Amino acid sequence: MISVDAHRETVTGLLGNAPVISLPLASAAGLVLAEDVLAGVSLPPFDNSAMDGYAVRAADVAEVPVTLPVADDIPAGRVDIGKLEPGTAHRIMTGAPLPPGADAVVMVEHTDGGVTDVRILRTAVPDAHIRHLGEDVVEGTVALPAGTVLGPAQLGLAAAVGLAEVPVRRPLKVLVVSTGTELVDAPNPLRHGQIYESNSIMLASAIRALGCEAEVVRSVVDDVDEFRAVIEPRLADVDLLVTSGGVSAGAYEVVKDALTGQGVEFRKVAMQPGGPQGCGRWNGVPVVTLPGNPVSVLVSFEAFLRPALLAAMGHSGVDRQKVRARLTEAMKSPAGRRQFRRGFYTHSEGEVTGVVGPRGGPGSHLLASFTQANCLIVLPEEVDSAEQGDEVDVLLL
């Protein structure tokens, strides 16, 4: 058997780095900058008022109350700004350019709000309520470094420094295929011996949640020729093929039979659930093959696909948050395998560690228990049992 870490490294290496493309800001949310972004303008691009009020010379309001003539009115957006003469005030709105000669702004709340003359009731020190040119970002400097994940604030900053598009790692296009003659697509009626197909729904939704694109082919029967005929023509348009089912050691393992000798290696990974795995290239396209039981599919996605897809799209933080927690009940684990058990983690206020308890048994078919879990409890290969109260590693989902 190969280790979990070794298989993860192989899967990650298959994908490499996604291509760099330029996308409009509105289409770049959640993606990762591939290059440094330079500020096309300074922020603020000019000295401006932080408040609605009056632009003044601080020396003119050193003693209050004082009444000054209002020589001009400056709304936000005005571009023809005249000089402030000594002994006068300009009424000014938030964001409006500061007139030359002014060195302070008095809030309107500290005046009588006059239009032709204004009575100022409080003093103002130089620089009061002024936003200065470039105090946030200086033109020509790096506004957002490569590797930045583009959330709302980052996209807002990109727009504010004059960008309409940004260079990002392109979202990967993934073909998701579920196999098994026993599979039926809902709401078609089931016959005895059939089950509803669910793996492709789970995988596609998990893949799309990362910002990737997912095309789905559901319920391919266990026939090698049909599998190849259905899937091979679609490979030219995708970055990755992910299959579920058909990779174990028994008969009618359609994925294994179709792709053995085609550049895909099938192996046993030292983990529970999800031991049967495969990866490689088919017609030059990266392929990751997963087992068919639904819990094995989701655990395999967490262990291998999620970090590989995120890394390919430029993310640096690809791992789930790991914490330590005390078990609320004893657990068993097969010797020599890393066990991933669904669990529910609770943080204990004031405690260094939280507590965690398993949800459902270790069976890879027990999907309902996954819906009640918020974490995976990880027992390493060298551990075959853990007692109530023992500390274990927990991956928060």
Image (cartoon, helix red, strand yellow):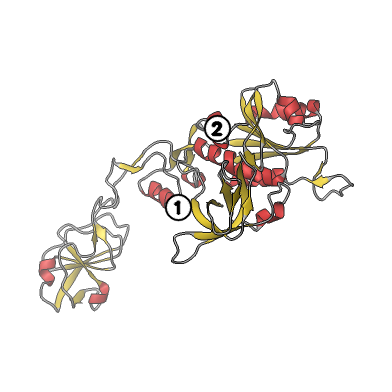
Image point (45%, 46%), residue name:
150
Q: Considering depth in this image, is 18 or 52 the residue closer to the camera?
A: 18
Residue 154 percent coordinates (x, y): 41, 49
Between 37 and 387, the one nearer to me in the picture:
387
Give the amino acid type for the residue marked by disc 1 in the picture: Pro
Q: Residue at x 50, y 46 (%)?
A: 30
How many marks on residues? 2
Viewer can see residue 362: yes
Q: Quick one: label 2, few (<14), some, or many (20+) residues within 10 Å?
A: few
Find the distance from the CA under tag 2 to the CA under tag 1.
Answer: 36 Å
**Residue 198 relative to residue 352: left or right:** right
* Front in this rendered view, residue 379 or 182: 379
In the image, residue 311 sits, relative to residue 294, either above or below, namely above
Disc nearer the start of the sequence (2/1): 2
Q: Nearer the viewer, residue 311 or 75?
A: 311
The 10 Å Cα crowd at callout 1, few under 14, some 14 to 19, many 20 or more, is few
* Dot 2 amino acid type: Ala
| The quadrant where residue 183 appears | top right
Q: Quadrant of residue 261?
A: top right
Residue 112, position as x, y percentages in the image: 24, 79
Quick check: 203 left or right of 88?
right
Which residue is the site of mark 2?
A: 6
Q: Which residue is mark 1?
A: 152
Q: Position of residue 86 (x, y in %)?
A: 11, 65
| Callout 1 secondary element | helix
Name the residue located 45 percent from the left edge and 52 percent from the top edge. Answer: 152
Residue 137 in the image: above or below residue 350:
above
Q: Quadrant of the N terminus?
A: top right
Residue projecting furthest to the right: 192
Mark 2 lies on a secondary structure that is helix
